[in-house]
Amino acid sequence: MTQIIVNWGDGQSDSLEIPFPTEALHTYINGPANRTITVDLVDDDGTNTAATLQVSVLDVTPTVAFSGADSVDEGSHYTITVGPVFDPGADVITQLTIYWGDASPNIFSPAPSEVTHTYADGTTNPTITVDVLDDDGLHVNAGSFLLTVNNVAPTLSLGGAEAIDEGSLYTLTLGNVVDPG
């Protein structure tokens, strides 16, 4: 025997020369797919298929990284950085759906690098999650980020004279109450 040829079933092959290794390594670029590995042996009489093996290449769920502040005040804009999106396959990401943890998802196509959201009320601890749609389908919960939404105390504007004579009736004007939550 002079040569071993491993056909990986994805259009790639490796030719192994003497001395023959005990292992052959290969990386499949994309799944899901079913592949048939064939091993051909070459000797003085020619090339003959000596063995076959069926392999299922599984699709791996992409992962999305998030970064941003750990907390935000209610009523304020919150900005989070999205990415990178890591997919070990040769897949094209076509859409991200971000769930803010307050029943108000946003769909983005193409994927943005930053997104902004306003939380109406605190104190809460929403988990921001993301679903990824690629050419292999929908991947649910491909990333998450825990956030604290702080309650902001309401404010009230007051008005009235800065000085008053003793024994006199004082008038306090109550203005608008502002509560960002």
Image: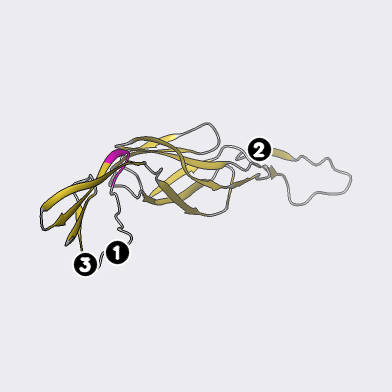
Q: Amino acid at mark 1?
A: Pro
Element class at badge 1: loop
Horizontal placement of 159 versus 128: left or right? right
Number of the front mark, 1 or 2: 1
Quadrant where the C terminus is found in the figure: top right
How is the structure coloured here?
A: secondary structure
* Residue holding disc 2: 177
User: In 3D space, how far apart are the residues under numbered discs 2 and 3 (Cα atoms)?
Assistant: 85 Å
* Residue holding disc 3: 18
Element class at badge 2: strand
Q: Amino acid at mark 2?
A: Val
The quadrant where residue 62 appears: top left
Q: Is residue 176 or residue 32 the one in the foreground?
A: 32
User: In 3D space, how far apart are the residues under numbered discs 1 and 2 (Cα atoms)?
Assistant: 78 Å
Q: Is residue 117 or residue 108 the one in the foreground?
A: 108
User: In 3D space, how far apart are the residues under numbered discs 1 and 3 (Cα atoms)?
Assistant: 8 Å
